[in-house]
Amino acid sequence: MPSPTRPASKPTGLECRMAVLGADVRLTPHRREVFDTLAASTDHPTALDIFTRIKDRSPGISLATVYNCLDHLTSAGLIKQVHLERGQSRYCANLQEHVHFHCETCGKVIDAHPAADFDPARFWILPKGTKVTRMDIAIHGTCEACANK
Amino acid sequence: MPSPTRPASKPTGLECRMAVLGADVRLTPHRREVFDTLAASTDHPTALDIFTRIKDRSPGISLATVYNCLDHLTSAGLIKQVHLERGQSRYCANLQEHVHFHCETCGKVIDAHPAADFDPARFWILPKGTKVTRMDIAIHGTCEACANK
DNA sequence: CTTTAGAATTAGAATGATTCTAAATCTGTC
DNA sequence: GACAGATTTAGAATCATTCTAATTCTAAAG
């Protein structure tokens, strides 16, 4: 099973996700691969991380294409861009409502989900007329492993 | 009154803020100027914005120094770094608990304050052992002016 | 099955933000 | 008033990202 052939890649749900969201992007092999790679990652990789992971399977792909695919997938709403620190953007295929816990010691990023009764709209007083499209919540601190180091 | 002499700069509260927070940074003229400039800004300027604003008063200052001062002030907890988009970091001297509303059309950033009964600790389920030091909340959307454009 | 127009992809150059480096200057302490 | 250590400087270096122009692919029309 650890054969070097291209993994049979069960349909990862990109089409399904596109259908659910009514998203409209041309589905090229590269875009699919970028999405699959991200969807298989739990660590909020950077563009370069994704590029590195894909290169084993698709040696021809270029970093510019990875950026390009990530941008298309992001603007179609199929994935999310995450900005936690100065420097690189990270990406995340988890579209459930969640926040990012960022360990300032080891850099690890963990998804955390809201309590059942959380109602974001109710908690911040925004200027009248403001339209909200999305909310990014980052919680910074120390993860258990680092706290016990 | 619009004289070109250095504004008499009423004590802006940097010392006071340092005392309240128990922060320990050597207070150099540049650091004070960076802080004062930021404290006088409501628009969440970038390092380059701050550099430009200061240069009129202190022609000798270098961009590296502005970065340096911003980093020192940030790690002393006297100001906050804000990451809303790919690209430059922004800075903010408002230490009250607040969130940033970011207009995706005009780029404007507005501070919004939480409702009185908001209790952040209660809303997200974090892994056990996690220690939280701070929380960054960004709300993206369209401001009233842009919505009516 | 060909043509064709538009989209996607590429390598590499270019840009923009930030950090680094090494030398010069300043500050507080003895 | 000298010295060690911190701060500041200009400019070079680095890192992440975007741009460019040429090439390749794709889907739809003929």
Image (tube, coloured by chain):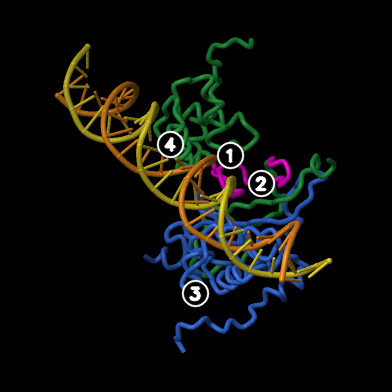
Chain colours: A green, B blue, C yellow, D orange
Write down the chain letter for disc 4: A
Residue at point 76% right, 52% down? B132
Q: Which residue is mark 1?
A: A92
| Badge 3 vs badge 4, beta-carbon distance below 8 Å | no
Rendering coords of residue A118 (x, y %): 69, 54
Binning the other alpha carbons within 10 Å of mark 4 as few (below 14), some (14 to 19) or many (20 upward) gives: some
Q: Nearer the viewer, mark 3 or mark 4?
A: 3
First of labels 4, 2 by sequence position: 4
Along the viewing direction, whichever of B136 and B123 lies nearer the viewer: B136
Q: Of helix, strand and loop, which one carries label 2?
A: strand
Mark drawn on residue A57: none
Q: Of helix, strand and loop, which one carries label 3?
A: loop
Write down the chain letter for disc 1: A
Q: Which residue is mark 4?
A: A68
- Over which residues does the magenta segment extend? A80-108
Q: Nearer the viewer, mark 3 or mark 1?
A: 3
Residue A106 seen: yes
Rendering coords of residue D29 (x, y %): 20, 28
